[in-house]
Amino acid sequence: MADEMVRLAQRFVNTTYGNGATLGISKLDENGITGWTTMYALTRALQYEMGITSLSDSFGPTTLSTIGAKYGKLDETTVPSANFCRVIQSALYCKGYDGGEIDGTYNSRVKAAVEKLNQNMGLSVTYPGSSLWPKVVKGLFNMDAYVTVGGGSDTIRSIQQWLNGRYILRKDFYVIPCDGYHSRDVAKSMLFAIQYELGMADGTANGVFGPGTQTGLKSHTVSAGTTGTWAQLFTAAMILNKRSVPFGSFTAEVKAGVQSFQSFVKLPITGVGDFATWASLLVSYGDQTRSGTACDGVTMITPSRAQALKAAGYQYVGRYLFNPSSTSLPEKQIQPGELATIKEAGLRCFPIFQTWSRSADYFSYNQGTSDAFKAIEWAQYHGFKAGTIIYFAVDYDAMDGEVTQYIVPHFRGVMRTIGENSSYGVGVYGPRNVCQRIADAGYSATSMVSDMSSGFSGNLGYPMPTNWAFDQIATVTVGSGTSGAIEIDKNVASGRDIGQGDFNAGSYTNDVDVDLNKTAYRNAMLKDVQNYLTSIGVPETGGDGWSDKDWATLGGISTTKAYDLVVGADWLFTSLARQLKIRKALIQAPVMWELRKLNPLDVAADEAVKAGLKDDCSTGWGQIFAWVTIDARNYCLQQGIINGTPLSKATDIRAVWDDLQDPTYNIRSVAYLTLYNAHQLGIARPSLTTSPAETQSLLARYNGTGDAAAQYGRELLGLYNVLENYNKLSRSK
């Protein structure tokens, strides 16, 4: 919400530092909304007023030390100029405090605001009065909140204030947020606090869970009856891990909470705050020396390696379904005969699927759909049985906004595809926040947590996901000798997923379609499509008695555009063809034809349904009726080809029609309709060897029955042959 005083603060910056290009101070939008851009500009203005020549968005060591060296603290006696004071007043308003009239006077209103700021930060004892000390100024010029933000915990806020008040005078401890939320900064402040209480000097304490910290904690076990600072730190760590215990002394209630936590993370249930419990509370990987019964790796499990794992206490092995690289990590993908070796050794296997997945721009709904189809195919190829959970990787430190924008839609595509096209389950492999967000969205059954990446922002400040199955904590080598040694990532197992101990024979991938070799064939294929369509009276544009002007204005597209749309969705056509073991061109041909033949009547029919004037019409890329889609999908459900809930033509017409506006749903439905049409014709389900005559019959049935449908089949068979020619060339590469 816009604030008038924030708008005036932005105007002050623009008016006073109008030569921002020289000073590096950006011109601000005077919108009354605080954001990083405004805080950066105010930080640079503060640096300028202090005489710092190299301005920066960062309120770093130079800015902090300059305040201390020049002024000691800021108040009515030390603020050097009116504009300097106006910068302070503006920052106060941007943080939600009364900064006076931005008049350059450190007056009673400013003093009251500073006192309130110190109090909210938990610093009123350390810094009584109305002076701004350097670290407080640093906290003033950022976007941290010092009041409980909506949904935040007042108890967590009291812990944040306690940490600030107790440790602010230590050299490397800075004001942390007091907003009621656990975060990366709060997690690191807890490690600093532990180190300070262990007696580490400034400069030695670094907020890292290193050997010195670990050794010190081993002599600071807390238990029922413990009071004082160590009990406060331990209960704070419990609360920050979303455990409902009181902050302060180690009471019977705390002991019960510890037992519950230890049970959840699979530690010995002692009710005591020992080193392993401290470690699990403070850092994502916890005590890396604790035993694990699961592992994952990129090395083939041979009989000797399997025996080494078994002897070391491992029961579950995570292996990759697929390796997109033919040169990197040659044993990353499950190798021929490997699952039989795992079974014979009495081990169990859980599959992981990963291609790239190392940046936000990889993830999308369509990519999730594509990955899921590939994962199903590879799981079937290796012989994983129904009920297997496949872990889809998010192999980078995803920011929370990226999870919302990219990763959640990606897993929506994964879940929809796995659910509709297989009997497998969906797991997620990634940082804690990613795993919990996907679980909360309903798109995963279990999580494999990449807790070794303790510095990830998606791990720091986040508790263990509620549905965790495997907790990846350390890289170790098991076994010995050239043939027996194997490097693995050690995992703690929760028991939520026990993998698979028996496997099917596996499925085939011979002669199925592959992605179109666009580099080699795109242009030639387009030319042949254009030539064929022209030969049957379908020019590049127009046709069917419509003028080019009417046709283009009211929805028609060119042959090239129709071709580009189909080739752009080649991944989906390929996935469906491989999954259903049919020829890709059998799905492509009617979709490309219907896209090219869109006309003003189709557009008008769509608008009539949207307006409620009609119940149904052929629609979308494949120009399918909703009622036909319902029949086709219900048939495939009955045959066990897809999964889902039967649809009703009495109640689901409009919902299905709306779904058909989504090209992925529409193209899927074209594929399912092709199978249903074979049933309607009384011929065999289409396969990789369906004859030309039956292919023509299937294409004709797509348009109904009668003479018009027969002509449709003859015309589409020619288009099918053109498309199949280039699909075959791609298969042969």
Image (cartoon, grey):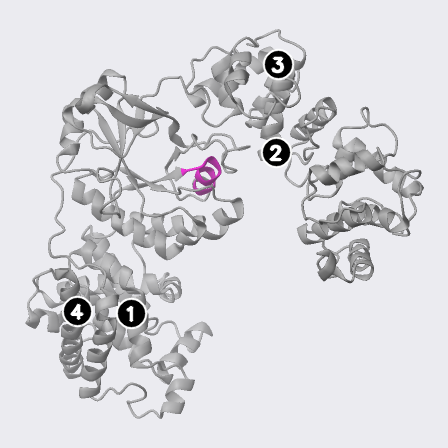
Q: Earlier in the sequence, mark 3 or mark 4?
A: 3
Amino acid carrying label 1: it is Val
Distance between the alpha carbons at the discs numbered 4 and 2: 56 Å
Distance between the alpha carbons at the discs numbered 3 and 2: 20 Å
Q: Are marks 4 and 2 in contact (CB under 8 Å)?
A: no
Quarter placement of the C terminus:
bottom left
Residues 242 and 300: in front is 300
Residue 198 has which mark?
3
Q: Earlier in the sequence, mark 4 or mark 2?
A: 2
Q: Residue at 70% of width from left, 43% of height from top? A: 142
Amino acid carrying label 2: it is Asp
- Look at the image and say whether residue 402 sits in the magenta stretch: no
Distance between the alpha carbons at the discs numbered 3 and 1: 65 Å
Q: Earlier in the sequence, mark 4 or mark 1?
A: 1
Residue 726 has which mark?
4
Q: Residue 536's image quarter? A: bottom left
Secondary structure state at the residue bearing disc 2? helix
Residue 185 has which mark?
2
Q: Residue at 40% of width from left, 76% of height from top? A: 606
